[in-house]
Image (cartoon, grey):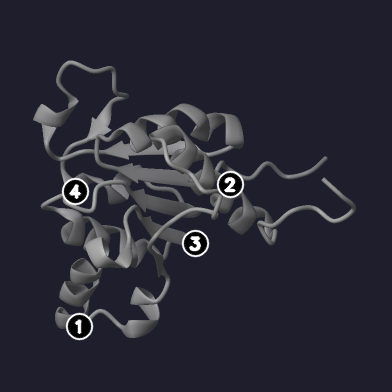
Amino acid sequence: MEPHAPAPTLVVFSATPIAKALLRWAVDLGFRPVFVETRTERMAGAEWPRAVTDLGQLAAALGADVYAVHTDHDAPDLVQSLEVILPCNPRFIGLVGSRRHTGHHLEVLRAKGVEESVIERIQSPVGLDLGAVTPSEIALSILAGLVAVRRQGRGGWKQGGR
């Protein structure tokens, strides 16, 4: 009998179309999703799972094996979100958006004394290079990358043809 390890936790920050797709597929891929949105007005008029709305309560919702993706590079609490998740030593941290859009957040972390080795672990842009354009395609590329990290895969084409 094999021991049963708890599902890894996928923390998805911000109510965006990409987040909606990540949350929809996470369970099917073996993740336990935790949705975080501190701006409750962003969830109005749409179906969202129950959210952690206070960053101070996030640590209590996490397990030992954590992956995190922030889906809104314009979120006013992006740096605070990272400050909360970084001490949990996530296996993966990703920010949706190019370095042009996310770089200033990383500079704020540097100015606050976050070690460069920690900042270098933050992936931005995030996801495998699938040429993704739509929110669902971007979410697929992110989840494919998370599975590759979790299973220690390379994330490229399998050998032996297509």
Question: Alpha-carbon distance for marks 1 and 4?
Answer: 20 Å
Reply above or below: 127 against 107. Answer: above
Question: Alpha-carbon distance for marks 4 and 3?
Answer: 19 Å
The image's mark for residue 10 is none
- Give me the residue at 15% from left, 40% from top: 38
Is residue 8 visible from the viewing direction of this image? no
x%, y% of residue 74? Answer: 16, 51
Amino acid carrying label 4: it is: Leu
Q: Are marks 1 and 3 in contact (CB under 8 Å)?
A: no
Q: Are marks 1 and 2 in contact (CB under 8 Å)?
A: no
Q: Are marks 2 and 3 in contact (CB under 8 Å)?
A: no
Amino acid carrying label 3: it is: Arg
x%, y% of residue 15? Answer: 25, 34
Amino acid carrying label 1: it is: Gly
Q: What secondary structure is marked by label 3?
A: loop
Name which of mark 2 and mark 3 comes first in the sequence.
Answer: 3
Question: Where does the C terminus fall, quadrant-wise?
Answer: top right
Q: Which residue is mark 4?
A: 55
Q: Which residue is mark 1?
A: 113
- Give me the residue at 19% from left, 76% from top: 107
Q: Which residue is mark 2?
A: 144
Q: Which residue is mark 3?
A: 91
x%, y% of residue 73? Answer: 23, 53
